[in-house]
Image (cartoon, rainbow, N blue to C red):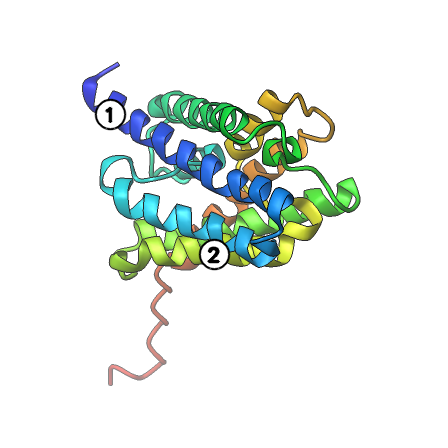
Amino acid sequence: MEKGLLRRAGAELFGTYALVTAGCGAIMVNTQTGALGHTGIALTFGLVIMVMIAATGHISGAHFNPSVTVAFALTRHFPWRDVPFYVGGQVLGAVSGALTLRVVIGDVATLGATQPAGSVGASFGLEVLLTAMLMFVIIAVATDTRAVGEIAAIAIGATVALDALWGGPISGASMNPARSIGPALVAGVGTDQWIYIVAPLIGAAIGGFLYQWLRQPAAQPAPAEGAAD
């Protein structure tokens, strides 16, 4: 592996580690103290994404999410050869974050693992929808030169928080296979975890391709007959 790719994968590892320790840590702390509430948990996920994008976006692009990495590759904004290294770093970071939480806080709230609160179908549909919305925003601010790049961290962090605010009570609002895999592996939670792998991958692909379609320049209308006379 080239040194540049190693550094980028390392940034992905650290960013995803921060996401899990802060976001899932907020779930665990709230279970013990009730101090944060649902709004506080949602804002924690959004804020940690915002600050880590600001800190590492210039190094790796700050994906922190296998579904985002795959969607970028599908839309030809990221090389497929680098996908395994990014995804490996993201999953390792999530597992390391969950292990840290287990050591520091203990076996609380299944380490923040995502599990459906409603039906499997509702959770699957929500994860597709929420991730599509997230990827739509990410690809817009990250790849379109017409977007204001300086607000990328704020826009993406706000989208994560918004999705978590309204979708979290039903599906957990994971939108991220690594974020779900890490705590689930460490806590030994296996039931319905396929939702949080398959649905975000589908949703991110939808969101990415939708923006790619919308960003295409409109065809110029043909001149009216006789306009050149």
The answer to whether residue 210 of the structure is visible from this angle is no
Q: Which residue is at the far top?
A: 1
Q: Quadrant of residue 124?
A: top right
As helix, strand or loop, the secondary structure at mark 2 comes to helix
Indicate the position of residue 59 as horizontal and vertical percent values. Answer: 23, 36
Q: Residue at x 72, y 31 (%)?
A: 192
For the C terminus, the quadrant is: bottom left
Look at 47% across and 26% down and name the residue there.
100
Instruction: Check the picture and name the quadrant holding the N terminus.
Output: top left
Vertical relation: 138 (above or below) 162? above
Where's residue 85, x and y in %? 37, 21
Question: In the rendered structure, are the residues bearing label 2 and label 1 in contact, judged by CB atoms less than 8 Å apart?
Answer: no
For the residues marked 2 and 1, what is the alpha-carbon distance in whole angstroms? Answer: 27 Å
Left or right: residue 206 compared with residue 115:
left
In percent of the image, x 57 and y 58: which residue is there? 39
Could you tell me if residue 196 is visible in this image?
yes
- 102 or 138: nearer the eye? 102
Residue lying furthest right: 119
Q: Which residue is mark 1?
A: 7
Whichever of labels 2 and 1 marks the residue nearer the N terminus, that label is: 1
Instruction: Give the quadrant of residue 31.
Output: top right
Amino acid, disc 2 = Thr
Mark 1 secondary-structure assignment: helix
Mark 1: few/some/many CA within 10 Å (<14, 14-19, 20+): few
Q: Residues within 10 Å of mark 2 (few under 14, many from 20)?
A: many
Three-letter residue code for mark 1: Arg
Task: Give the residue at the far front of this rendering.
Answer: 33
**Mark drawn on residue 45:** none
- Return the x and y of residue 43 as percentages of the image width and height: 49, 55
The reply, left or right, for residue 211 in relation to residue 60 is right
Q: Which residue bears the numbered disc 2?
A: 159
Residue situated in front as seen by the camera: 91 or 133: 91
